[in-house]
Amino acid sequence: MGKNVFLLLDQKITFPELANKFYGDAPIILEASASSGLTVTFAVISGPAVLDRNKLSVTGSHFNLKAFVAGRMSLKPRMTCRIGRF
């Protein structure tokens, strides 16, 4: 009996550079798109910042923010990290 082979395709996440923000500034609305058209999700992985869906509030300086998109049958999961310095 033969094997089924599935090749997973890469995805690309694109998002604009964050403007400089400081503690006490209005929250930043994060935007990103995936080449697959799937939803991009954000997470604060370290540092002083609070994330509510795609609204980021800066509560200090130097934090790590992650943007990721899940995979599906023909797509690899994709994750990208960026460092915010505010």
Image: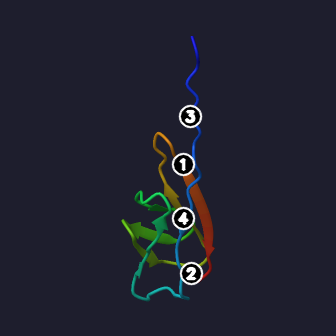
Query: From mark 2 to mark 4, how far is it between C-alphas?
Result: 13 Å
Q: Position of residue 74 (x, y in %)?
A: 50, 42
Mark 2 is on which residue type? Glu
Which disc, if any, is residue 6?
A: 3
Identify residue for label 1.
77
Identify residue for label 2.
17
Marked residue nearer the N-terminal end (3 or 1): 3
Query: From mark 4 to mark 1, how far is it between C-alphas?
Result: 11 Å
Query: From mark 3 to mark 4, how far is it between C-alphas?
Result: 22 Å
Query: Which corner quadrant of the image does residue 60 belong to?
Result: bottom right
In the rendered image, which quarter contains the N terminus? top right
Marked residue nearer the N-terminal end (4 or 1): 4
CB under 8 Å between callouts 3 and 4? Answer: no
In the rendered image, which quarter contains the C terminus? bottom right
Residue at the (44%, 87%) spot, across then down: 24
Label 2 or label 3, whichever lies nearer to me, is: 3
Q: Position of residue 68 (x, y in %)?
A: 51, 58
Q: Secondary structure at mark 1?
A: loop
Label 2 or label 4, whichever lies nearer to me, is: 4
Q: Secondary structure at mark 3?
A: loop
Mark 4 is on which residue type? Ile
Q: Position of residue 25 (x, y in %)?
A: 44, 89
* 69, above or below 6, in the image: below
Query: From mark 2 to mark 3, how far is it between C-alphas?
Result: 35 Å
Mark 1 is on which residue type? Pro
Crowd class of label 2 (few under 14; some 14 to 19; many from 20; radius 10 Å): few
Mark 3 is on which residue type? Phe
Marked residue nearer the N-terminal end (3 or 4): 3
Marked residue nearer the N-terminal end (2 or 3): 3
Label 3 or label 1, whichever lies nearer to me, is: 3
